[in-house]
Amino acid sequence: MFKRPLIVFEGIEGSGKTTHIKNITKYLKNKKIKYINIREPGGNKNSELLRKIILNKRSNFHIFSDLLLYLAARNENIDKIIKKNYQKKIIIIDRFIDSTIAYQHYGMGIDLKIINLINKYLLKDIKVDFTFLNTVSSSNLKKRLGKRKNLNKYDKFNSAFYNKVQKGFVNLAKNKNKYLIINSDKKIEVNSEIILKKIKKLIFKNEK
């Protein structure tokens, strides 16, 4: 028997979220455990259309318009994917509520009360069971973004902005037992082992 948690991977650009999610979904697939894997923005047809608009490097939306587009994409995921699979399948999300708070509040200064109010309305009884927060140093972030062939709008902020966002993430994780901070400056193999061990505890009832 196993549990069906909603697990989120958070972190700024270049922090290794995508690599770790691939490793976990590969593990679940090998174990023949049903799961849903979505990203934000994106996840379903409508959300992916919004993703193209939001991340387009030529877009110049007002920061509040940007927020509403992100939340619209989230609403589409909740309505079309998350609600019907919640507690029925393991749900893994690449960025979720904390990303909105870290980027739009800590990074861009939008009122936290507004973000929390809309998120509360969208999610209702849906709750995140566990969050992996991936952190990365400014030097490694710069190196990793430098290797990317295609940069979107959110890959092009300055280091001061990313520092604000990452500090926001860390602040959200403070003193909370449903978070695990992963130092992405360490070797991927080391972190992958740590994450997989925790995933097993989250899924299997008798795992220690």
Image (cartoon, rainbow, N blue to C red):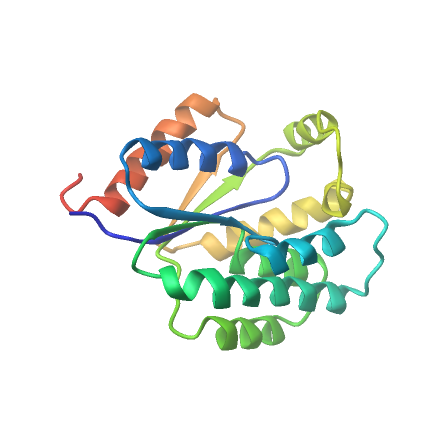
Left or right for 43, reference 13: left
User: Residue drawn 75% across and 34% down?
Assistant: 150
Location of residue 94 in the rendering, given as x and y in whole percent from the top left corner? 52, 47
**Closer to us: 29 or 39:** 29
The total number of labels drawn is: 0
Is residue 27 something one can see in this rendering?
yes
Left or right for 177, reference 21: left
**Closer to us: 195 or 86:** 86
Location of residue 31 in the rendering, given as x and y in whole percent from the top left corner? 27, 34
Q: Residue furthest front?
A: 45
Q: Quadrant of residue 201?
A: top left
Is residue 94 something one can see in this rendering?
no
User: Residue drawn 83% across and 54% down?
Assistant: 59
If the image is split into quadrants, where does the C terminus sit? top left
User: Residue drawn 35% across and 61% down?
Assistant: 86
Location of residue 81 in the rendering, given as x and y in whole percent from the top left corner? 46, 60
Q: Quadrant of residue 156?
A: top right
**Closer to us: 142 or 52:** 52
Q: Is residue 110 above or below residue 22?
A: below
Location of residue 17 in the rendering, given as x and y in whole percent from the top left corner? 52, 38
Q: Is residue 3 above or below residue 120?
A: above
User: Residue drawn 68% across and 69% down?
Assistant: 68
